[in-house]
């Protein structure tokens, strides 16, 4: 199994500790996926931590990239 590192510069809010059960259900809805699955420059998105689930951020993406390219 391999992992790829992603880096983002966002202007937004740290919502860690404020997520609810409604958010967990909503993020996999059609509307929620628009705010979770499009993490590229120029988008407004939620960022959660899929590995530990201990972080949640919401904001405008100023820049993004990974180990190999910019988005």
Image: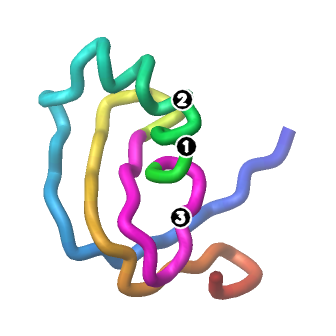
Q: Nearer the viewer, mark 3 or mark 2?
A: 2
Q: Residue 37 in magenta?
A: yes
Residue closest to the far right? 1
Q: Is residue 52 above or below residue 6?
A: above
User: In this figure, which residue is indicated by the disc labeled 3?
Assistant: 39
Q: Is residue 5 above or below residue 8?
A: above
Residue at screen point 52% across, 51% down? 34
Could you classify mark 1 by the number of other residues whose Cα lies within 10 Å: few (under 14), some (14-19), or many (20 or more)? some
20, 16: nearer the viewer: 20
Give the CA distance from mark 3 to mark 2: 17 Å
Residue 12's x, y, as percent? 19, 66
Residue at screen point 82% across, 47% down? 2
Give the CA distance from mark 1 to mark 3: 11 Å
Residue 66's x, y, as percent? 64, 74
Q: In which quarter of the image is the C terminus?
A: bottom right
25, 1: nearer the viewer: 25
User: In this figure, which residue is indicated by the disc labeled 1?
Assistant: 33
Q: In this view, does 55 lie above or below 6?
A: above
User: In this figure, which residue is indicated by the disc labeled 2?
Assistant: 29
Q: Are marks 1 and 2 in contact (CB under 8 Å)?
A: yes
- Magenta part of the chain: 36-48
Residue at screen point 57% across, 37% down? 30
């Amino acid at each position: 199994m391999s992992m790829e590192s992603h880096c983002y510069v966002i202007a937004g809010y740290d919502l860690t500790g404020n997520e609810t059960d409604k958010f967990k259900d909503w993020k996999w809805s059609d509307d929620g996926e628009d705010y979770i699955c499009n993490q590229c420059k120029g988008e407004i998105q939620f960022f959660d931590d899929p590995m530990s689930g201990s972080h949640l951020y919401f904001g405008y993406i100023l820049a993004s990239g990974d180990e190999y390219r910019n988005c």
